Image: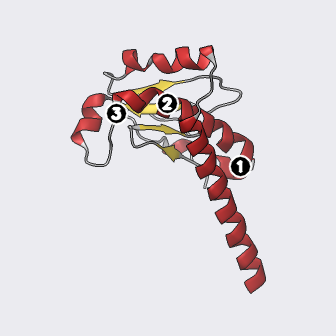
């Protein structure tokens, strides 16, 4: 029993390290795709909306859901730095790709990436009010 728990813990730690290293690499060296750059550059049109969503490639990545600049400014835990925003969004799309390919279908619905810049990448759609749709969660 102890060996089984130890193996499970080791596997979980290795998976977390994989995601952390993938995200760090994505922040340092973002993809050089013009389509991705065009998608991410649309944030300037969206950032005044109370909540928004941005999709790059639905077959490969997860949709980004976000909140307005005004909402980010009202919180202590979110920070949106203009000079880092495009890199963070590109990295979030890449993280969505990693989450999609690395998570079994049963677990994929439970995995969420939350950015300090006020957006999230997740397989569960957001409602119009910016909350997770309880009807779509199958625990």
Question: In this rendering, is residue 67 above or below 14?
Answer: above
Q: Is residue 138 visible?
A: yes
Question: In this rendering, is residue 130 above or below 15?
Answer: above
Q: Earlier in the sequence, mark 1 or mark 2?
A: 2
- Decide: few, some or many residues near mark 2? Use Cα within 10 Å; few <14, some 14-19, many ≥20: some
Left-right relation of 96 to 84: right
**Label 2 residue SS:** helix
Q: Do callouts 1 and 2 mark residues in contact (Cβ within 8 Å)? A: no
Residue that carries the numbered disc 3 in the rendered image: 81
Q: Do callouts 3 and 1 mark residues in contact (Cβ within 8 Å)? A: no
Residue that carries the numbered disc 2 in the rendered image: 87
- Decide: few, some or many residues near mark 1? Use Cα within 10 Å; few <14, some 14-19, many ≥20: some
**Residue extending furthest front?**
28
Front position in the image: 119 or 33 = 33
**In which quarter of the view is residue 85 placed?**
top left
Q: Do callouts 3 and 2 mark residues in contact (Cβ within 8 Å)? A: no
Q: Earlier in the sequence, mark 3 or mark 2?
A: 3
**Label 3 residue SS:** loop
**Which mark is nearer the camera, 1 or 2?**
2
Q: CA distance from mark 3 to mark 2?
A: 10 Å
**Which mark is nearer the camera, 3 or 1?**
3
Q: Earlier in the sequence, mark 3 or mark 1?
A: 3
Question: In this rendering, is residue 42 above or below 101?
Answer: above
Residue 27 numbered mark, or none = none
Residue that carries the numbered disc 1 in the rendered image: 103
Front position in the image: 137 or 88 = 88
Q: Residue at x 38, y 37 (%)?
A: 118
Q: CA distance from mark 3 to mark 1?
A: 30 Å
Question: In this rendering, is residue 107 above or below 124?
Answer: below
**Label 1 residue SS:** loop
């Amino acid at each position: 029993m102890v060996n089984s728990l130890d193996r499970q813990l080791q596997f979980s730690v290795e998976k977390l390290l994989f995601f952390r290293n993938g995200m760090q690499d994505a922040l340092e060296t973002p993809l050089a795709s013009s389509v991705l750059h065009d998608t991410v550059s649309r944030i300037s049109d969206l950032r005044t909306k109370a909540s928004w969503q941005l999709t790059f490639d639905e077959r490969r990545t997860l949709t980004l859901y976000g909140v307005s600049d005004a909402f980010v400014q009202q919180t202590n835990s979110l920070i949106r730095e203009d000079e880092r925003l495009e890199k963070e969004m590109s990295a979030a799309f890449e993280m969505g790709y990693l989450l999609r390919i690395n998570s079994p279908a049963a677990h994929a619905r439970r995995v969420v990436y939350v950015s300090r810049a006020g957006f999230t990448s997740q397989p569960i759609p957001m409602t119009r009010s910016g909350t997770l749709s309880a009807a779509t969660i199958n625990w």
